[in-house]
């Protein structure tokens, strides 16, 4: 069963950072057969490394994940996403070595919606959420120092939020020779909303804030704007990237109602966006 999706991307530099080192993308193949097999792909990447390297790493992450997902043999969405993260890791390591940008890397989350299922892969602290009814579920667990301590019962969420090591990642693209993303798959149903975001959003909004903004807005574009506005109203100290995907119903034919060419996103008209 093919689902009708209403989706929007929004990328904002925030109010403090001079550069935007986040990247996001929504990819929907024009080719009908490819679309039917591999569905639609959404990616958020948060680059790091300074000296103009973070945005390079994030850009490589989004492009490589997209290319690897839509090319080569089809092994199913979870396996393809895993392979795509491995490819992105290698591409970032190679670019860092060849370009004298040692230490650049990226956190990333990707969601592939195929028929009525979503596969989510991530490395680092970009997050995926699912809102169903009044309930919000995290689809990802941060690969971070504070998350490990919380999992071990040695840190509370309130302590983690202000901890000096809260930005220390334990896994990321470009950090190690072998990438080990977490990948999971679950069913989607009409009425569901997916959110992918960088820590520039979730660091300033708890799960309840996110669920409320997602469900109150009439469509994906307004939900994305509401989420970015929320982060800006709370200081916007970091780059903010948001992908909202709302499942509005089921259709029997595979023709999508929203058609974006590969690689295009909707950041035009955003006053904080850098060229
Ligand atoms: Ca960030």
Image: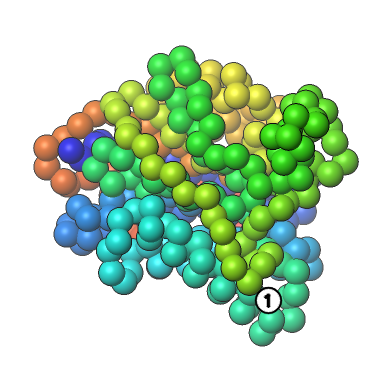
From the viewer's perspective, is 59 left or right of 67? right
Is residue 114 depicted above or below 92 in this figure? above
Q: Nearer the viewer, residue 111 or 26?
A: 111
Q: Quadrant of residue 220?
A: top left
Residue lying farthest to the bottom in this orientation: 98
Q: Residue at x 16, y 46 (%)?
A: 254
Q: Which quadrant does the N terminus fall into? A: top left
Q: What is the quadrant of the C terminus in the image? A: bottom right
Crowd rating for badge 1 (residues with CA inside 10 Å; few <14, some 14–19, many 20+): many
- Outermost right residue: 164
Q: Position of residue 33 (x, y in %)?
A: 17, 59
As drawn, the residue found furthest toward the top would be: 134
Q: In the rendered view, tell whether residue 198 sits above or below residue 264.
A: above
Q: Position of residue 13 (x, y in %)?
A: 67, 47
- Closer to the camera, 99 or 224? 99
Q: In x, y percent, where is residue 178?
A: 59, 68
Asked if disc 1 is less than 8 Å from ligand 1, the answer is no
Residue at horizontal 44 percent and vertical 64 percent from the top? 83
Residue 215's x, y, as percent? 46, 20
Q: In the rendered view, how is the structure colored?
A: rainbow
Classify residue 166 by image quadrant.
Answer: top right
Q: Mark 1 falls on what kind of element? A: helix
Q: Measured along the vertical axis of the image, is residue 199 above or below residue 130?
A: below
**Which residue is identified by label 1?**
96
Q: Residue furthest front?
A: 152
């Amino acid at each position: 069963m093919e689902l009708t999706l209403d989706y929007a991307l929004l990328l904002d530099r925030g109010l403090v950072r001079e550069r935007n080192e986040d990247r996001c993308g929504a990819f929907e193949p024009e080719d009908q057969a490819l679309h039917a097999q591999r569905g639609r792909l959404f990616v958020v990447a948060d680059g790091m490394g300074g000296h103009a390297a973070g945005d390079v790493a994030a850009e490589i992450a989004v492009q490589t994940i997209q290319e690897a997902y839509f090319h080569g043999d089809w092994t199913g969405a979870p396996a393809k996403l895993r392979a795509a993260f491995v490819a992105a890791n290698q591409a970032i390591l190679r670019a860092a070595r060849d370009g004298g940008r040692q230490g650049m890397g990226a956190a990333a989350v990707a969601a592939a919606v195929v028929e009525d299922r979503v596969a989510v892969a991530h490395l680092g602290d970009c997050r995926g959420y699912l809102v169903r009814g009044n309930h919000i579920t995290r689809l990802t667990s941060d690969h971070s120092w504070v998350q490990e301590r919380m999992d071990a019962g040695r840190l509370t969420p309130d302590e983690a939020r202000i901890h000096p090591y809260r930005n220390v990642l334990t896994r990321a693209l470009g950090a190690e020779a072998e990438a080990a993303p977490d990948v999971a798959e679950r069913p989607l149903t009409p009425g569901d909303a997916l959110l992918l975001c960088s820590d520039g959003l979730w660091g300033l909004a708890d799960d309840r804030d996110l669920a409320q903004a997602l469900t109150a807005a009439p469509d994906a574009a307004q939900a994305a704007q509401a989420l970015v506005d929320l982060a800006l109203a709370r200081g916007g100290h970091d780059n903010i990237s948001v992908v909202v995907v709302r499942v509005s119903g089921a259709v029997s034919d595979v023709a999508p109602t929203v058609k974006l060419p590969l690689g295009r996103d909707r950041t035009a008209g955003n006053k904080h966006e850098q060229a």
